[in-house]
Each structure stands twice: as structure tokens, then as C-alpha cells.
Amino acid sequence: MDGSKTPSVAPVLILLGPPGAGKGTQARMLEDSFGLVQLSTGDLLRAAVAAGTPAGKEAKAVMEAGELVSDEIVIDILRDRLAEPDTANGVILDGFPRTTVQAQALDALLAETGQKIDAAISLEVEDAEMVTRISGRYTCGSCGEGYHDTFKQPATAGTCDSCGSTQFKRRADDNAETVASRLKAYHANTAPLIAFYDQQGALARVNAMGDIDKIASDLGALVKTAVA
Ligand code: AMP
């Protein structure tokens, strides 16, 4: 990682990794530990689809097919979100960038405010594990806390640990067929970003197989160094 960042500038972290690597779960844990804000372009796009905005209408079918939404739409959505005041203390980007064009746009956007990436952390997992992980996952319909049929059940069955809600939901694109397309899109477009950030001296890697708390602890140690 690059030690030359300006300490007064808010941290910008990127979580890289295939669908199901645990980016969302880990980003939420980092929000709690470091006071950073999670920016998930997947969440922003799902909100746009639900709200029926022009971007949402364009993105809907693409997301259902497990393909990538256009760089233009995603960059616009991210730019608007980054302009909101709650991002001032630092952000964890989850699911963005996913292409080299997005990565270059992010560098340019951050440069406008004298910022740059503190670390791009690659969550390293094996494809074979992804289908199991994705097909069992669900979230609290109220606060968004993530759960899994096998790996992470609520302490009290049917009740969210974080907010007590009893409403849960599963994503429409978390099915075996779409997961295959999402993995393909990851390998074709997003995996090359690992080399992109390595060349910038910003890359760190975390073994993201196994226990969620162990992964969180390894990741937390890395983030602590990156934002120090
Ligand atoms: P995610 O919640 O990150 O798994 O994203 C769900 C879906 O939203 C992806 O399969 C893509 O169709 C779309 N998506 C999210 N982020 C991006 C991005 N940065 N670039 C292109 N498409 C995206």
C-alpha cells in the first residue's frame, strides 16, 4: 500500500472481489468499526430500479441477466452519491469500480477534491464456493443486515439481530443461472483491476474463504494500517 496519502483527507477504500465474496457483509462491519460509509453501486442501482428512475429502467434487465450496467449510468450514480455530505468522513466502495473505465473515472473524480484511493482490498475466494454462498444468502428487509442459510443465521430465528425486524428478503439475481453470468462478468471485466491497483501500489489481498469474523479481523487490521 502507498504510504504517501495526505492524512487530513478522508479515507477511500475499495473492496474488490467476485459476487458472493462477502464485500457487502465486510463493508458493513467496517462501517461500524471505522465510521466509514459503505457505497454499494448494486444497492444504489436496486434503489433506482425500485424508484423507476430512467437509469433504473435501463439497468433492470441488465441486472436480471447478471451483466454489467453501462459505465455511464454507474459513474453518474456514484458521482451523485459521493457528493452527499455523509461521505465526508470516508467511504468503502463495494462493487465499484467493476471496469477499467470506472476505475479511471474514480481516480479523476477523487482528484477533483485532492483525494485518492488509500487501498483496494481484494477479497480472494474460489469460484466453486460462490454459488453456495450466494444461493443461501438473504438480508433484513428493514436495516439490510446480511444473513445466510448455512453460515450466518440470526441468533433468534426469524428476527434480525441488528434491528429486531421479522421481514427478510432475497435478491432476484441470487440464483444459479444469474450467478454464472455475474462470475463471468467479474472475470472478464473486474478481475483485471487487481493488476491495475497493484501497479498503483494500492493493492492488498485478504483470504476471504472461511470464518466471517476471522476475515473481518484480517481486513480490519489492513484497513487500520491503510487509514492511519
Ligand atoms: P452487486 O449488488 O454489487 O452484486 O450488483 C448487482 C448488479 O448490479 C450487478 O450484477 C450488475 O448488474 C449491477 N452493478 C452493480 N455495480 C456495478 C458496477 N460498478 N458496474 C456495472 N454494473 C454494476
Image: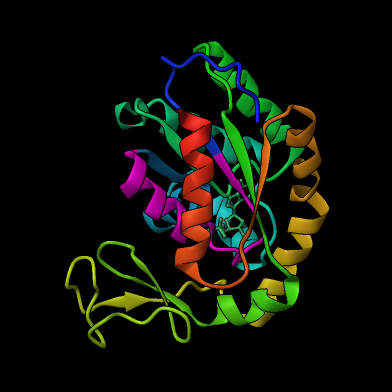
Q: Residue at x 64, y 35 (%)?
A: 72
Instruction: Name the residue: 41% across, 14% down.
Output: 8
- Splitting the image into 4 quarters, where does residue 19 fall? bottom right
Q: Locate residue 81: give its quadrant.
A: top left
Measured as percent of width and height from the top left, residue 95 is found at 57, 49
Is residue 26 shown in magenta? yes
Examine the rendering and report whether any part of residue 12 can be seen.
no
| Rendered location of residue 12, percent (x, y) | 50, 31
Residue 21, compared with residue 74, is above or below; it is: below
Front-most of 214 and 46?
A: 214
Name the image colouring.
Answer: rainbow
Point out the quarter of the image occupied by ligand 1. bottom right
Please tell me whether residue 114 is drawn above or below residue 208 in the rendered image: above
- 30 with respect to 45 (left or right): left
Instruction: Using the image as rendered, state which of residue 75 and residue 82 is in the foreground.
Output: 82
Picture quarter with the C terminus:
top left
Seen as rendered, the residue at the extreme left is 164
Q: Is residue 175 above or below residue 36?
A: below
Would residue 152 appear left or right of 222 to someone viewing this image? left
The answer to whether residue 129 is seen in the rendering is yes
Any magenta on residue 145? no
Number of residue marks: 0
The stretch in magenta equals: 14-35
Compared across the picture, whether 11 is left or right of 202 comes to left
Viewer-closest of 131 and 119: 119
At 59% across and 34% down in the image, what residue appears? 119
Residue 149 versus residue 12 in the image, above or below: below
Q: Position of residue 7 (x, y in %)?
A: 45, 17
- Quadrant of the rendering where the N terminus is positioned: top right
